[in-house]
Image (tube, rainbow, N blue to C red):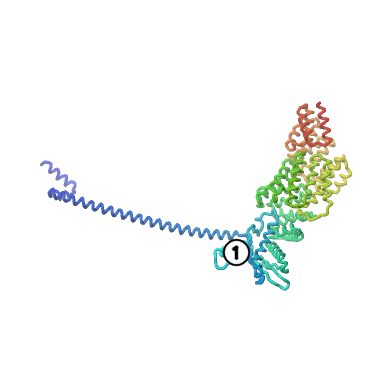
Amino acid sequence: MAEEPDQEQGAASTGAVDPIAVALSGASRHKADQFLDEQIRLARLQAADMEREDSVRHWSLRVRHISDVLKMSFELAIAVIALAIVTFIASAIWSAAEDHGLVVEAFQVPPELSQRGLTGQVVAAQVLDKLAAMQTATASDRPAQTYQTNWGDDLKVEIPETGVSISDLSRFLRQWLGNQTRISGEVFRTQAGLTITARVGANAGDRFTGTDADLDRLLQQSAEAIYRHTQPYRLAEYLGEHDRRDESLRIFIALADGPPGEDRIWADHSLQFALMDMGDVPGAVARAQDAVRIAPDSGAAWDGLGETERSLGHDEAALAAFEHALPLSRRNSDGEPPGVAAGLVAWQQAYAARYRGDFRMAAPEFERAAETDASLGLTPISPLTESVRDFGLDHDGPAADVAEVAVQSAIRAAKARFGAPITNLNSLPQAELVADIGLGRWLQASGPGQAIQALLAEPTAPSKEPVSGKERLKRSLAYFAYANAMTGDMAGAVAMIRATPLDCYDCIRMRGKIAAAGGGWPDAERWFAEGVRQAPDIPFAYFDWGAMLLAKGDYDAAIAKFMLANQKGPHFADPLEMWGEALIAKNRSDLALAKFAEADKYAPNWGLLHLKWGEALLWSGDGADAQKQFAIASGLDLTAAEKSELLRLRSMHG
């Protein structure tokens, strides 16, 4: 009984009343169980109902998710379609804006001609064929992108259509946004016969009239008129290549005298060579200088100036132009095709090396130019002939002979390809002559020398060479004159050298060398001083002057000139070799050895070098190594006097 107050106190303290407990406290056991069963059943029904509601809720969420996915997919599809449409339109607009092609519209023709098959489309196709043939037949070094109107290979006839189509939209965009060249025209009858009018865009047309039998000629005239209006530079080149030189020159002159621009630059470039061919030397130089003035960043313009100055024997100006052109051409400032750009760089490197006396570099560069400039599947002849010259000046007889064989092979291949003799080979005898001088082959030089005289005696005819050969042929006689002096024909040499120009660097040098060969020291010194004045950055006149002083016996003065020559051309072997000879003459063979060793880097196949090297070794007390150098010399080119000297020196060693 004592626990009851505590229980009551506990219930009161919680303040909670359980209805089920209250209901059951006064019920029988049976009713209590029945009540619990009903509660359990109710709980189960509620749980089942909740499960159904949860299932429905999940299904609703799934449906809503699918709906959202479908909606997003639809929106993405719309976006993709819109993007595709925008891309298509943008592509069409870009393509239209970049269209630089040629479109020839169907010509208007009278019904009677159409019935005979000469429809407007046929006439348009014939004109297009003529234009395509002219474009194919026009050889040019000028990059395509420098033309204001450049069709490339995009030439087509436009066929009119009925209705509205995608092609109509494309045509509209190209006409509106593009840079198409559109050609139209008519064919009609007049009292004079058949007349064709061809016009470019909305410009007035050019008319050409003839008989029905003249149709092909009229079409050709129409095509040339279109070319004249759209690509005058190419027409000028086409006319020049098809023996219509006067017409070509008139177009070039008009372009070169026109406003600044690509056409003027390239017209100057072409005109300078044409004027040179015609003998207008001042005009050629003026055009070349105009090109570099209006296009100072054009490697081609500077190269053209170098070629013009080189053809005149203005070696200092040529060297400056080529060295200015070289970095521009290396970065391809004119946008040339890669092969053309590489060939241009090789040419310029070769000439720059030649003018510095680095023949060991120049000759292979000319050969590389031949490899990069293959035309019509043939090895170019001109750069190979230049390599013959420089191998000879490097005193490398075997290499010069191999290069000459390569030239002859290229000539035979060209003759076989074209089925006719190749006439523009004036550079070959010049190269052979200079090579013979470099190798000391004085008697052998008479062959190419006489060939040059024969070429100069021929009547002057229009030349297709890029640079006229006449001026260079005249200049080459200076070398022939020197060869004659070395064979003892001093009178003939003096008479021949007097006919050479006084503004030609090599001609001045040969005047001095001929005077020196005859013992005329004051005259020789005067000519060499003039050579130094004309070309202060080129080493050859300094070297020639030193060689004359060495022959005179003024060794210290000779060494001073050789030092200057070496400064102007560090890879020029000749002043190093003669510097060594001067040291031998001063009884300083020990110092000469270093000069010969350095010269050997740049002219390793020079017979005289190894002969003198052996002599220096002999006087230095190294007989064994001297004999090695003598053995090398005996297998290389030596003059008759040098061979006698070799026998004498060998016999001294026993």
Q: Residue at x 79, y 56 (%)?
A: 462
Residue 328 visible in rendering:
no
Q: Position of residue 504 (x, y in %)?
A: 80, 48
Q: Nearer the viewer, residue 27 or 211?
A: 211
Residue at the extreme bottom of the image, as rendered: 191
Q: Position of residue 23 (x, y in %)?
A: 15, 50
Q: Nearer the viewer, residue 327 or 154?
A: 154
Q: Residue beneath label 1, please?
A: 175
Q: Position of residue 398 (x, y in %)?
A: 76, 39
Write down the quadrant of residue 621 in the picture.
Answer: top right
What amino acid type should be assigned to the residue bearing mark 1?
Gln
Quarter of the figure that contains the C terminus: top right
Q: How many marks?
A: 1
Residue at the extreme right of the image, as rendered: 491
Write down the quadrant of residue 531 in the picture.
Answer: top right
Quarter of the figure that contains the N terminus: top left
Task: Please tell me how crowded label 1 is: few (under 14), some (14-19), or many (20+) other residues with Cα within 10 Å.
Answer: some
Q: Position of residue 110 (x, y in %)?
A: 66, 71
Q: With respect to residue 439, does 31 lie above or below?
A: below
Residue 443 visible in rendering:
yes
User: Could you tell whether 198 is left or right of 480 in the image?
Assistant: left
Residue at the extreme left of the image, as rendered: 1
